[in-house]
Each structure stands twice: as C-alpha cells, then as structure tokens.
Amino acid sequence: MRDPEAHTASPSSHPASIQLLVALSGGAEDATLVRAAHRLAAGDRVNWCAAYVESDREDPQRRLMLERDFALVQRLGGDVRVISGQDRARELLALATELKVATLVVGHGRPSGWRVWRRPLAERLARLGGPFDLVVAAEGRQRPRFRPRPRQRLWYWRDLGIALSSTLAALALSAALKSWLALGNLSLLFLGAVLVSAILAGTRSAMLAAVLGFVSFNFFLTEPRFSLAMVEDDQVVTVVVYLLVAVVVGQLAGSARKRLLALRASREQTYQLLTFARELAVATDRARVGEVGVATLMRWLGCPVVMLDATDDKEDVALLHSAPAGQRLEPDARTAVAWTRLHRRPSGQGTEQPMDTDWQVIPLVEQDHLVALICLALGKREHPPWPHEEGRVDAMLRMLTLALERTRLVAYLEASRLSEENERLRSALLSSVSHDLRTPLASIIGASSTLRDLSDQLKEADRAELLDGILSESERLDRYIQNLLDMTRLGQGNLTLERDWISLEDLVASALRRLAPALQGLCVERDWPEDLPLLHVHPALIEQALVNVIENAARFSPQGGVLGLEAGVEADKLWLAVTDQGPGIEPHLRERVFDMFHTGGEGDRGRHGSGLGLAICRGMLGAHAGTIVAEPGHDGIGTRIVMRLPLPDDIKDPHRHVD
C-alpha cells in the first residue's frame, strides 16, 4: 500500500509526530493490539496512538472495556483519540492521513452478530488504500487476565418464564374484559405484557413476549377463534399494528433497561472507587495504604490478596500485608513473583505467563520505579470474574500505586527536610561556637599570658582586674557550655525531672546572685504578693531558665534602665514576667526568638550570644508543662517575657500557705 522505503525514514526528524496508529474495536482483543503496537513503537522508537471510532450504538459493556484499554495505552506511553462516525474504515483512513502515520495496526477478526456479511476491517482498509503500512495483529492463544463468565442457561429459562407469564396474564385479563372492551383495546394488554417483560428481563424477553402475544391474540381472540385465520380486514390491521408496535416498544424498553442497569453499575463502581480514594487519602504511611489496598481487593474479588514489599531499593521481597490475615503464598507462586519482579509484567493465573499457579502477580510501577507487588489468588475463586471487573481492578491498582508512591515521596521529603534542618543547626552551632567559645577563650588566654609575662611590671590593681576578667570570661564560657549541654539533653529527651518544693523568692534571689556582674548599672524592681504558693519543680532547671531570661533582658536594657520582675497566680498557674526597657521585639519575631540560634539577624558578629538561651527556657519550662511567651512592654516600651508554670492540685489557692 505504501512505498517501503518511506518507512525507513528516521523518526528523529519529527519527534513530536505520531508514526504508528492502532485501531481499537472495544473487544477483548484490544489489549493484545495495544501491547503489540507498544512493542512495534518501542522497537522503532516512534510515537504511537490508539484510536477508536465511536458510533451511536455504544454498548455499556464495551465502554467499560474501552476505559480499561485507554488506561493501558496511557500507561505504556501512547496517546488516545476518539472519533465519531458510522463507517469505521473510512474514519480510520481519514485520521491516519491527517496524522501522517507510517503504520496502521488493526486486529484480525470478522464482525459478529447479524452483520456477518460485512467485510473485515483489514480487508476494507486494504481496498480503500492509504499512505501507510497496514499491519494485522492476531493473538496465537488468547489468555485474558479475567476470562468472561459463560452465560448460564438459567438466564434463558428466566427470560422465557417472564415472557410466558406476562403473556398468560394478559390473555387471562383479555378474556375477562372481552365483553366490555373492543378488540383494538385488548391489544394494549398484550403490549403491556411486552413492556413488563422488557423491564424485568430485557430485549430478548420482550421480543419473545411480542411473538407470544401475536400468536395468542390471533388464536384466542380473533374470529374464527382457536385458529390463526382471520376473516375481517380490521382484525388483520389490529394484529399487524400490534406486532409492529410491540417490537418497537420492546426494543426501546429493553434498551432503556440495559442503559439503566449500566448506569447503576457505573454509579456503584464510581462510589466504590470514591470510597477507596478517600480511605487512601487519609492513610499517612505505607503500611496503612497497603492494609487498605489488600482489604478492598479481597472484598471486591472475593479471593485472598497478598502485597509484597519489593521496591528497587531492596534486594529481598518481604510480606507487607495480606488479606485474610496470615495468608501466605504457596511455593509455586514464588517463581511468578521472581519473574514479575525481573520483567515488571504480570505473571501467573490468567496471564501470558501462567507458570502453573493459582496466583496472579501484578507489578505496581510508577515512573519506571517498582513500588510493590500485588498477588491475587484468582484460581481459588468459584468462577472467573466478569470482564468489567478488570477495569475496576485496574483503576484500583492505579490508585493504590499512586498512594504508595505518595507515601514514598513524603518519606523522602521528610528525610530531606530533617537532613536540611540538621545541616542548618550544625552550621549555626559551628557559627555560634566560633564566636561564643573563642571570644572568652581569647580573653582568658590574653589575660593569663599578661599575668605570666608582665607580673612584675603590673600594679596590684591591674593584676586584680586581669584576674576578675579571667573569672568573668570563665563563667561566661561555662554558661555557654552549659547551654549547649542543656540543649543536647532537651533535644535527645534525656532530661529527667527531680522535683522539689521551692519558693519563687528563693529562685529569683539565686538567679540574681549569679547575674550580679551582668546587672551592674541596672535597677531591678520586684513586685509580687507575699503569699505566693510553693512550686514543685526541678529547682536547678527553673533557676537556669530564669538566669537565661534575666540575662537576655539585661543585654538589651540601656545603662541605668529598669528591669522589672512581676509574679502572680491565675488559672491554676503561677506566672513570672521579666520586663526590660530595650528596643523591643517586632510582632512577627516574638515567636521566632524562642528558636535555636536566633540572634536578631546579627549571627556570630553581634553581642547577643548564640541564641540558645530562650530556646533552652522553652524546653525547660515545657518539661514542666509550662509555657513562655514574648509580649510588648508597658506602654509599648521594651519587651515583657512571661513564664507560666502549673501549680500542684493541693496548693492552687494562692492564699493557702504550705508549711
């Protein structure tokens, strides 16, 4: 049909164009056609597309199979085109000419049903001709994943029984009403029998009821009775019109019933898939997703289901979930599992690789990444599944694959986030150590070397000043190291609370004594009632928290400023507020000041330290179920840090004294 040399043109000249087109029919052979087209396209490294010609006589069962095949095309990297028309061969020829395809793949088969006189599609395309290679694909042996269930004879007897019963009921009613109704009106009763048969059983039963009604009406009601002969012309017209109307009405009613059943099945399937999607959406980890997936598959298929954790990152195959619980794979299924994992194609029961096992193994692959393996015990079912079940199971497996891939990506992103956070903290810690540890060490080394080398030349006052500097910088260095150790203990969860009873007055007094050098030049004002209850806390931790807060306020207070300490009891908690007259904190930074290494944007070049003090305070108070917040100071001047600690149940009354 086409110059062979034209097919040898390099596909790279038009990488975005479609070079191969496969024609779908909506039948069971479409899956084979799609796979054959995919192999041809992959071998020639060309783009390919699947096309379907849609007519006005679409069958709901065919639509379900088409949706399954469309999903398979998209998974294999192809495109999908749906066109409308009555002449399938001419529509495909027009589409192939429009796309300028090099190869057209069609199935091998003859039309079924009453249109057996029509030529096969391949023969009609060959007669029409076209600028492409025509490839006819035929399957050597047909092994669909889900074999259609053979129609049972019970349904034939049911159709016959409904048609016969409705006709007998119409005949009996006509015999009872014959003396009151005309012959033409009696035919409506038989027409009602046709409608009842169509509603209850479908088109086949309606046609049978129409024929039975035609014979019964002519044999029992027209003259001469008990004979098929008719002597009056109006009787002939009545019977013929009845038969025509019954055939048309039966066809329409049967078609409406068929569409209604298909709509109900589609609605039920949509509801089930929506429910499954909601269950997957709330599943936060891989284990929960697998549990939901195998439970739903077992409920839909009625057979045992096993999910294997077999990703590309793992060498071994481990059992992830099974339904029912405790279900294990038989030894003969392990070969299918190994083959599927290696080739990433289904194997086992009902596939091209049967391997003499009752299990079917399906790989869940997303973007060339193996997510898991699903094993279905289809051989243990009482009967093969319906063909439309394949589309539903394929949709569910696709959703399950996406959910598993989502959990993998979430875990990967979380690990990346933690790694990035650890790296940031490590960098901040090194930056803090480079300043906060080296600065006091440099002061200590300088003062010590001066005392050693120039001791005889220094006055007593100078030596005392150098010793005071060494002591002060040593204490400063000790506080930094203690902060780092406390932060490490808080972060690792190794902090144990050894509680004891202590008053707020003692805690504040001890903290102020430790900070006496830092508070020089500041006026400290204390304001709280004398009957504050005792605290049942870890004294050293709360004292360290107070030291950090007061020291932080002293850094930002101006020389000669006022540093206020207030306390009280409210809502079963004791609160302590430290107020300074510094520059204050911007509203959007009042929460961030409690983050580790937050130093107001100056980093290790500022005078405000490592940024661990307030973060440690939050951790220490949090260990006691307390809180700490930053608020604006009085009249909008400075900052007010408020700490709250819960009181024991037996001393919540602030006016009750404890001995």
Image (cartoon, rainbow, N blue to C red):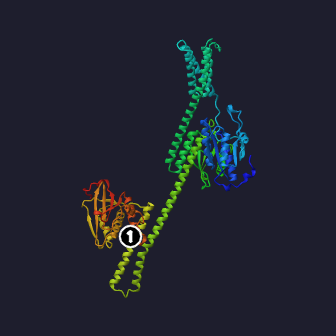
Q: Nearer the viewer, residue 173 or 618?
A: 173
- In the image, is residue 184 above or below residue 402? above
Judge by depth and name the residue closer to the eye, 566 or 654: 566
Drawn side of residue 176 relative to residue 12, left or right: left
Count the labels in the image: 1
Horizontal and vertical percent position of residue 465: 34, 81
248 left or right of 625 in image: right
10 lies above or below 206: below
Quarter of the rendering containing residue 326 = top right
Could you tell me the amino acid type at mark 1?
His
Q: Secondary structure at mark 1?
A: loop
Q: Which part of the image, by quadrant, shows the C terminus?
A: bottom left
- Between 493 and 405, the residue placed more toward the observer is 405
Where is residue 151? Give x, y as percent: 64, 31
Q: Which residue is mark 1?
A: 608
Badge 1 density bin: few <14, some 14–19, many ≥20, Cα 10 Å: some
Q: Residue furthest bottom?
A: 457
- Left or right relative to 249: residue 3: right
- Give the image location of residue 229, x and y in percent: 65, 14
* Residue 615 figure quarter: bottom left
453 to 81, vertically: above or below: below
Q: Quadrant of residue 263?
A: top right
In this view, the residue in front, 504 or 480, is 480
Q: Position of residue 595 (x, y in %)?
A: 41, 63
- Note whether residue 332 is visible: no
Q: Is residue 455 at all visible to an observer of this figure?
A: yes
